[in-house]
Amino acid sequence: MSKQTRPQGVVSIRTLAMPADTNPAGDIFGGWVMSQMDLAGGTHAHCLAQGRVATVAVDGFAFHSPLRVGDELTCYTRHVKTGRTSLTLKVEAWARRGAMGATEKVTEGTFVFVAIDADGHPRSVPEGIADREAALLANC
């Protein structure tokens, strides 16, 4: 289990885990959690890249505890690296158990996105990442 007590990054998505998202054991399906994290990271990367991005890799994924029906899932994202055409973001998924319950990190992973043009080809990430990241932090 993770010993981290506070999320790192900006809130990029918040949603409620529903019964339709469960696996046969009754816990929330890990693929659903991963898709929410991909959406969160993609939203952050889209802002930084000033346009379309595509997920090209997910690395270092670790599940710490299950997400349950009724838990509020919040994904926090933070930019960790910029390449010529790529952005690497750390994404943390935290659960709030019940309406006012405690929060707990349920999983985390590192996502790599590539900036793409209208034809789906890689393009350079525009300069000024630090300014766009500061604007995201100011609005969370």
Image (spheres, helix red, strand yellow):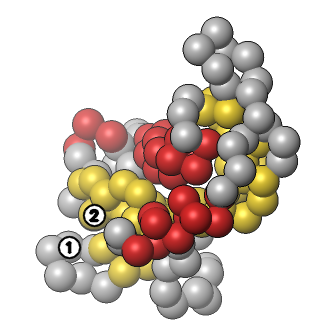
| Residue linked to disc 1 | 98
Identified by mark 2, the residue type is: Asp
Q: Neighbour class for label 1 at 10 Å: few (<14), some, many (≥20)?
A: few
Quadrant hosting residue 70: bottom left
Q: Residue furthest right?
A: 84
Locate residue 119, reporting x and y percent.
Answer: 64, 9
Quadrant hosting residue 104: bottom left
Question: CB atoms at circles 1 and 2 under 8 Å apart?
Answer: yes
Quadrant in which the C terminus is drawn: bottom left
Q: Neighbour class for label 2 at 10 Å: few (<14), some, many (≥20)?
A: many
Locate residue 52, reporting x and y percent.
Answer: 56, 29
Q: Label 2: state its secondary structure.
A: loop
Q: Is residue 65 visible?
A: no
Can you tell which mark lies on residue 109?
A: none
Relative to 107, residue 37 above or below: above
Quadrant in which the N terminus is drawn: bottom right
Locate residue 83, reporting x and y percent.
Answer: 83, 48
Quadrant hosting residue 21: top left
Cα separation, mark 1 vs mark 2, equals 6 Å
Q: Is residue 123 visible?
A: yes
Residue at image location 24% in from the left, 54% down from the top: 16
Pointer 1 or 2: first along the chain: 2
- Comparing 88 with 117, the one in front is 117
Q: Is residue 100 left or right of residue 12?
A: left
Q: Is residue 1 left or right of residue 67?
A: right
Identified by mark 1, the residue type is: Gly
Q: Label 1: state its secondary structure.
A: loop
| Residue linked to disc 2 | 71
Locate residue 6, reporting x and y percent.
Answer: 49, 86
Relative to 109, residue 119 above or below: above
